[in-house]
Amino acid sequence: MQKKTQGKAVRTAKKNLSDPAVSSGTSYSVKKRETAKKPRETYIYLTKKRTGVYHAIAQRNITIYDEEKNERREIRYCPGENSIYVDEQSPTARRSQIVFREGMLAVRRQNPSLIKYLNAHPGNIANGGSVFYLKDESKTAVQEVENEFAVHEAVGLVRDKTIDELLPVAMYLGLDVNEETMTIKRELLKTAKSNPTGFIKMFDNPTVKTRSAIMQAVEFQILNSSTDGMRWFDSGGLIVSTPIGQDTLDVMTRFCLTEKGSEVFGEITRRLDSIA
């Protein structure tokens, strides 16, 4: 029994050595079988502009250029016909109305004639039209993945950053920063999940940092905010006046972000640091 096994192993080894790639010592890799791209189950067409509940596209006297025959040919959608060209359809073919409902038309892949017609229609944006277009599923998938990553990143910021790092954003969002840390984080999570990209950008936004510092300065009585302007709390000196109908905090924030106001903001942050 053992000899038979050994003999089989020797025969296998000889067979492998007979392979040119093996006998020559050349390394090679087996190419993976390419899998065909799975066809869509449903093709979603959307109107470019908002329409009513029902919107029928034009179908009479629709012609397109046929490159193979080098001529313009009339097309129409007729259920049961394999071709969209009128001159190739049967004498009993009858045109069917194509209606978008709430700006959308879903076509199953089992209806290739309608798909061909819509893809060839001059009203299709892909053909230079301005009526409707085929929804790009690949872009939708990319957007969904990118948004999912952004949500994870935004949630990670709330989880990993200290409360001191989160406070500027919390104040900018108008949250009550006197609440407990977990309460503040819970509220921040709502924004992180609903608008992850915008939430992430807030941490590097100079407007957010400047506005939160000014709000802290008002709270610690470094600044005095009133409807007509922002003043130093101790001296009452006017820093910037507020035009009618505008918010003093917004005006002060914009001022501090200018070259003229940078010196004032530097003094504000110096006084805040001295309190800490």
Image: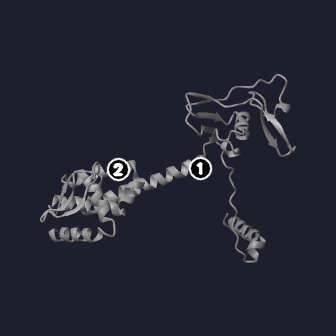
Q: Position of residue 16 (x, y in %)?
A: 74, 69
- Label 1 and label 2: CA atoms lie apart by 27 Å
The colour scheme is one colour
Q: Which mark is residue 138?
A: 1
In percent of width and height, residue 170 lies at: 28, 55
Residue 26 is at least partly visible in this image: yes
Coordinates of residue 17 in the picture (x, y in percent): 75, 72
In front of the other: 117 or 215: 215
Q: Quadrant of the C terminus?
A: bottom left
Q: Is residue 152 above or below residue 127?
A: below
Q: Where 40 falls versus 237 (above or below)?
A: above
Quadrant of the drawing holding the N terminus: bottom right
Whether the residues at callouts 1 and 2 have beta carbons within 8 Å, the answer is no
Q: Secondary structure at mark 2?
A: helix
**Residue 81 appears in which quarter of the rendering?**
top right
In the displayed structure image, the side of residue 214 where residue 57 appears, left or right:
right
Name the one closer to the observer, 90 or 227: 227
Residue lying at the far top of the rendered structure? 92
Residue occupied by mark 2 = 191
